Image (cartoon, rainbow, N blue to C red):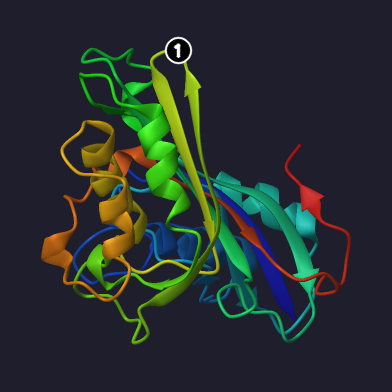
Amino acid sequence: MVYRLIVSYNGAPYAGWQRQHNAMTVQQRLEEALELVLKQSVRVFGAGRTDAGVHARGQVAHFHLADSFPEQGLIHGTNHGLPSDIRVLAAERMCSAFDARKSARAKTYSYRLSQLTLLSPLDAPYTVALGQPVDLAELRRASALLLGRHDFTAFALAGGSHKDPHRRIFATSWRRQGSMLLFRIVGDGFLRGMVRSIVGTLIEVGQGRRSAEAIGRLLNGQPRSEAGPTAPAHGLTMERVYYPPGLTMTPPHRAW
């Protein structure tokens, strides 16, 4: 039997999602908590390998069980064994073909920026302070060039496991709330460090250090050195993963 979990976490204390030998990760914490509930070893598989310091509001993970287990028990029992910076928000039984990564059709990421230098301690853990204004119209114009299927080599960090650098971007948006800026991007998948590299390059556009048209010229396999810096991890959040209908075996159970 295959179960899907919706997991939210503050990524700051962790070396990313994927289990590592020499550092604590979200996957390790989740597997340890599940093992306490299920009384057996469990391997969970995530929809995406968020990097160190990156947050998630809607990470998706799946795991296999030989016997059924109550979904509400999975939610509350697992949360009982998790630290407060990781929470299972929902659980549901899926069809046997479901795979959190392979079945995904799209993902949404967001990135939070502030034009201020000094941030509230309620915002600072999830927001990158720019300390100067940016041109929102230019940011939107440059971001529109990302739409479609392109070679994103220029925005990929070394060490990723993907062999094909092509990805399709379905939508981008910039929204201003006072001094805050929220960037959202929806794509069929993302290379390692891709969203943060895109944001770092777009910031250069917004600050007048690079033209909007330069973004388009980076989408044909240019080396990473041609794009801008990688934006800090703490501004990035995996918001949602999208799947085709018909994969659920039971109605979703949520923590609220």
Q: Quadrant of residue 163?
A: bottom left
Rendered location of residue 159, percent (x, y): 21, 75
Rendered location of residue 4, percent (x, y): 68, 66
* Residue type beneath disc 1: Gly
- Quadrant including the N terminus: bottom right
Above-or-below relation of 220 to 218: below
Which of 246/200 is in front? 200
Residue found farthest to the left = 225
Rendered location of residue 110, percent (x, y): 47, 43
Residue drawn at point x = 72 percent, y = 86 percent: 97
Above-or-below relation of 72 to 1: above
Q: Quadrant of residue 248?
A: bottom right
Q: How many marks?
A: 1
187 relative to 253 in the view: left or right: left
Which of 249/209 is in front? 209
SS at mark 1 in the image: loop
Which of 97/239 is in front? 239
Residue drawn at point x = 53 percent, y = 68 percent: 47
Q: Say few, some or many: other residues with alpha carbon within 10 Å of mark 1 (under 14 / 14 to 19 / 20 or more).
A: few
179 relative to 84 in the view: left or right: left
Residue drawn at point x = 27 percent, y = 63 percent: 217
Judging by the rendered image, the residue that carries numbered circle 1 is 178
58 relative to 209 in the view: left or right: right
92 relative to 8 in the view: left or right: right
Does any portion of residue 51 appear in the rendered image?
no
Residue drawn at point x = 33 percent, y = 27 percent: 135
Q: Quadrant of residue 122?
A: top left
- Quadrant including the C terminus: top right
Does any portion of residue 9 appear in the rendered image?
yes
Rendered location of residue 52, percent (x, y): 28, 54
